[in-house]
Image (cartoon, rainbow, N blue to C red):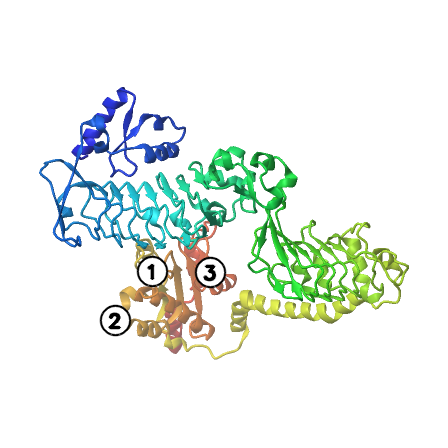
């Protein structure tokens, strides 16, 4: 801990006893003294926000007896091109203050002093240079200069910078993420020339901060962008924002809501005041979103002075108190927006108006009383449902659009609709969705409509022909229990309900039966055939190969070709398996006249491993494969494990080809065979050529002797006896 910080902590304890200040640091770098009342806030984030606004450095507080000395400026030419700072004082802290001058750049020796405050208001600075040699700089005031751009590289390394004032400049653009790029607690961008401001330069998620000021921007209508796609749910923000005297749009909080509901805003914006002073409320579709909150929270997030608590627009709400509007649902419904972007408009043919009405959670697209022949291709983007008014037009074919899943009301009254396309099913199946088709000219409906509920549709008194082709419509309405208050009538049965006439429609060919026989049967047969093939390949292909070997008459291997009885394939890197094979199994087999070939013992040194396997398995009558964990499943580039795979594959092929007489696959330390060549191992097990050592009901020794029951030495001895 440095001496300054230690001193401040001791000093704060003394001041705390007097009930005034306490040591506070927002980032572990700035050493500040915060007024005691901030620590009575109910949450840490509120305490930090209070201190971010109220805390002061030690040199700014007179009672600490720690002052700073103002530097003098030496000017070498009338153009202020060469200047230097000087001081006769031996102070710890210095300030440089030079207002209403012609400075275009900082004095050439500014890095030589421990400067904590700079004020160059009303000079000629065109840009902000990096002052990172001033490690103790706390306050930088460059108001009333001619700066046009602000970069987020300007103050890298200046962690103690707390206050930045760039008000009354000509700034039009600045980089993204300014607020989180530095540790600055208070920004002042008042009276600049911004055309747009990004969300990342308005709110600072998960960062201790006091405020950012944009008020009285020289361009009143400012676009609020969100180029980094910031969402409120990604963090917590608590800083004051001042937009007084300007009209930023869209609202920064509404634009960052994402998928959360308005009443959840407070979870992510627990503190901080957003000021929009200078005129009455614009009571539109944006402002009404906040009406899901308490009135006190609305005033915090959309703050104005008491004299401005009235609606300035729209005309229908002009001069009505916000308190009155907040309590009257009919007035709230008048808080709408006229949306122009992507609102369908073909002049003199099909001109639509698009009204956003958040209080009813809908976007109203009104194309009624036009000459429209189709629905709009696009509508404005919205998170609410869409009410599409197409009544009294000339729409003859109803075709689905990309926005159909958001339709809550589609009014096609007084349209000569003749065809509803099959893509009608893209409508939401929500029972609250309504499609009015009064005065239609329909003859039938698409069968895809069966995915929807019939009560969604209002067909009116115009009916359709009830015949064999349309009988399914009655069955659909009957099955879905359609309400009779939303009827579809038969034009050829005295306007009877179509569901009541299903049994009266006679002489129809049984389409379902025909479809079943013509389509379902071939499909079922195809699936059955494919299933048999898959089942055969999955479970029986190796069993059939083994059966074929058992009963096929082939010329068998010449016994004189065999030199060994049993080829031993096992993982010689596994200590347990190696000890079992070499110290138990191999001596036991030898005792019963079975000669073994053990690769790790009998392979010729220097011979190619693959050649050894191919050559030596052929010389053996039997093959014993002892599987153990990781015998096959390790790194395939390892020559050892490649060899074990090769031994299994070659043994199988030689057995099927009857070059060797028997295989015995043994699972040494697992209740099942290894996944490598698993289906072959299971097939061999079904033919009594498999064994699981963990099965204690059977004797491993006896299984070996029963399988390898005819040593080649016995046959040779018998042949020698007959020769004698």
The reply to whether dot 1 and dot 2 touch (C-beta < 8 Å) is no
Q: Quadrant of the C terminus?
A: bottom left
Pick whichever of labels 2 and 3 is earlier in the sequence: 2
- Residue at 60% across, 42% down: 317
In the picture of the structure, the residue carrying the numbered disc 3 is 690
Q: Earlier in the sequence, mark 1 or mark 2?
A: 1
Quarter of the rendering containing residue 206:
top left
The spot of residue 377 in percent (x, y) is: 61, 64
Does dot 1 land on a helix, a strand or a loop?
loop
* Viewer-proximal residue among 552 and 50: 50
Near mark 2 (Cα within 10 A), the count class, few <14, some 14-19 or many ≥20, is few
Residue corresponding to mark 1: 571
Q: Nearer the viewer, mark 1 or mark 2?
A: 1
Give the alpha-carbon distance from disc 2 to disc 3, as whole Å: 30 Å
Residue at 78% in and 51% down: 481
- Name the residue at the right extreme: 494
From the viewer's perspective, is the residue at label 1 or at label 3 nearer?
A: 1
């Amino acid at each position: 801990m440095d001496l300054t910080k230690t001193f401040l902590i001791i000093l704060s304890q003394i001041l705390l006893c007097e009930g005034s200040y306490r040591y506070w640091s927002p980032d572990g770098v700035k050493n500040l003294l915060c007024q005691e009342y901030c620590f009575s806030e109910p949450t840490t984030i509120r305490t930090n926000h209070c201190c971010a606004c109220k805390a002061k450095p030690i040199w700014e507080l007179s009672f600490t007896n720690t002052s700073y000395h103002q530097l003098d400026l030496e000017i070498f030419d009338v153009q202020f091109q060469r200047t230097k700072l000087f001081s006769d004082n031996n102070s710890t802290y210095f300030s440089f203050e030079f207002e209403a001058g012609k400075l275009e750049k900082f004095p050439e020796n500014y890095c030589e002093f421990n400067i904590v405050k700079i004020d160059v208001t009303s000079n000629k600075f065109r840009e902000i240079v990096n002052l990172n040699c001033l490690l103790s700089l706390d306050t930088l005031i460059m108001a009333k200069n001619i700066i046009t751009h602000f970069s987020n590289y300007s103050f890298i390394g200046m962690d103690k910078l707390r206050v930045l004032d760039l008000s009354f400049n000509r700034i039009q653009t600045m980089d993204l993420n300014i607020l989180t790029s530095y540790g600055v607690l208070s920004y002042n961008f008042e009276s600049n020339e911004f055309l747009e401001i990004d969300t990342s330069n308005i709110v600072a998620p998960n960062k201790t901060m006091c405020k950012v000021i944009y008020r009285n921007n020289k361009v009143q209508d400012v676009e609020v962008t969100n180029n980094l796609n910031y969402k409120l749910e990604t963090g917590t923000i608590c800083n004051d924002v001042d937009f007084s005297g300007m009209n930023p749009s869209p609202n920064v909080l509404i634009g960052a809501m994402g998928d959360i509901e308005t009443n959840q805003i407070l979870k992510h914006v627990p503190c901080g005041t957003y000021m929009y002073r200078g005129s009455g409320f614009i009571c539109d579709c944006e402002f009404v979103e906040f009406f899901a909150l308490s009135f006190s929270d609305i005033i915090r997030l959309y703050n104005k002075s008491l004299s401005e608590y009235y609606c300035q627009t729209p005309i229908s709400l002009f001069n009505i108190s916000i308190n009155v509007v907040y309590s009257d649902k009919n007035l709230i419904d008048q808080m709408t927006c006229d949306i122009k972007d992507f609102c369908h408009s073909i002049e003199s043919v099909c001109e639509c108006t698009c009204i956003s009405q958040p209080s009813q959670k809908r976007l109203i697209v009104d194309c009624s009383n036009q000459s429209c022949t189709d629905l709009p291709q696009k509508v404005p983007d919205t998170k609410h449902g869409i009410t599409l008014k197409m009544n009294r037009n000339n729409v003859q074919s109803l075709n689905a659009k990309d926005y159909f899943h958001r339709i809550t009301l589609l009014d096609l009254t007084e349209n000569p609709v003749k065809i509803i396309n099959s893509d009608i099913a893209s409508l939401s199946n929500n029972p609250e969705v309504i499609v009015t088709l009064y005065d239609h000219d329909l003859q039938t409906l698409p069968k895809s409509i069966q995915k929807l509920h019939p009560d969604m549709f209002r067909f009116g008194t115009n009916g359709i022909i009830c015949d064999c082709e349309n009988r399914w419509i009655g069955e659909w309405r009957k099955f879905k229990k359609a309400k009779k208050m939303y009827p579809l009538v038969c034009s050829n049965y005295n306007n009877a309900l179509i569901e009541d006439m299903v049994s009266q429609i006679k002489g129809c060919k049984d389409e379902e039966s025909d479809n079943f026989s013509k389509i379902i049967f071939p499909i079922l047969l195809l699936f059955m055939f494919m299933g048999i093939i898959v089942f055969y390949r999955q479970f029986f292909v190796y069993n059939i190969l083994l059966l074929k070997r058992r009963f096929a008459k082939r010329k068998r291997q010449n016994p004189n070709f065999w030199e060994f009885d049993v080829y031993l394939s096992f993982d010689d890197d596994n200590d347990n398996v190696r000890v079992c094979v070499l110290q138990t199994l191999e001596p036991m087999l030898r005792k019963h006249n079975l000669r073994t070939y053990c690769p790790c013992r009998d392979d010729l040194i220097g011979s190619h491993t693959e050649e050894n396997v191919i050559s030596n398995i052929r010389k053996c009558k039997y093959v014993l494969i002892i599987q153990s964990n990781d015998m096959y499943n390790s790194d395939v580039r390892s020559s050892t494990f490649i060899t074990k795979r090769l031994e299994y594959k070659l043994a199988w092929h030689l057995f099927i080809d009857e070059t060797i007489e028997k295989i015995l696959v043994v699972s040494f330390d697992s209740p099942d065979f290894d996944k490598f060549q698993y289906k072959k191992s299971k097939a061999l097990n079904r033919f009594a050529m498999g064994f699981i050592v963990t099965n204690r009901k059977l004797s491993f020794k006896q299984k070996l002797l029963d399988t390898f029951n005819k040593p080649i030495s016995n046959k040779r001895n018998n042949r020698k006896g007959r020769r004698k």
